[in-house]
Image (cartoon, rainbow, N blue to C red):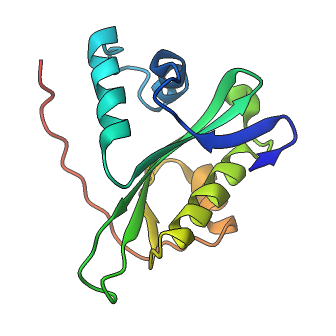
Amino acid sequence: MSGGDVVVRAAVAQDDPERVFDVLWQLAPDDARPDAGRLATAWRDLHAQAGRRLLLAVAGDTVVGTLDTLVAPNLTHGARPYMVVENVVVAPEWRRRGVARALMLAALDDAAAAGCYKVQLVSNAARTDAHRFYASIGFAQSAVGYRRYLTTAP
């Protein structure tokens, strides 16, 4: 899928995880950047995980947005899978230019192709602009979410 100067595509193992992480770091800029070895291991694991697909929005050779999906097997709803969406982020200079919409529409297409019965995501309560965006593409605030953060390993 493409729109204007941006192409949305699945990340491949040959992509540079450091360049992808440069965009992702906006989600938690106070966190320490993982060392190169840990990042490379996570990158390999991501690509090896069944049902996992990281979408990238790319302008030329620059990663300008990401969206991470996981299609999970399920025993309810006719044993149809569901998709979880995480790590939706667009570089600040590319916001409000249709990048997030292109990423989300690509994820929704993937979910439909996988036979998913739903796509779910959670968003920080303070991100009201993001909530308006999600509503504009058909998502409804239909659940109460909970998180429990665990102590990070050294």
- Where does residue 17 sit, x and y in percent of width and height? 46, 21
Q: Residue at x 85, y 34 (%)?
A: 5
Q: Residue at x 80, y 42 (%)?
A: 97
Q: Quadrant of the C terminus?
A: top left
Q: Looking at the rendering, which quadrant does residue 10 occupy?
A: top right
Depth check: give the residue in front, 96 or 4: 4
Q: Vertical placement of 9 versus 42: above or below?
A: below
Can I make out residue 1 in this image? yes
Q: Residue furthest right?
A: 4
Depth check: give the residue in front, 55 or 129: 55
Depth check: give the residue in front, 92 or 73: 73
Image side of residue 134 versus residue 80, left or right? right
Q: Residue at x 77, y 24 (%)?
A: 60
- Where does residue 57 sit, x and y in percent of width and height? 66, 37
Image side of residue 106 versus residue 15, left or right? right
Q: Residue at x 32, y 52 (%)?
A: 50
- Where does residue 141 sit, x and y in percent of width and height? 48, 72
- Where does residue 39 sit, x and y in percent of width and height? 33, 19
Image side of residue 149 versus residue 28, left or right? left
Can I make out residue 35 in this image? no
Q: Vertical placement of 24 versus 32: above or below?
A: below
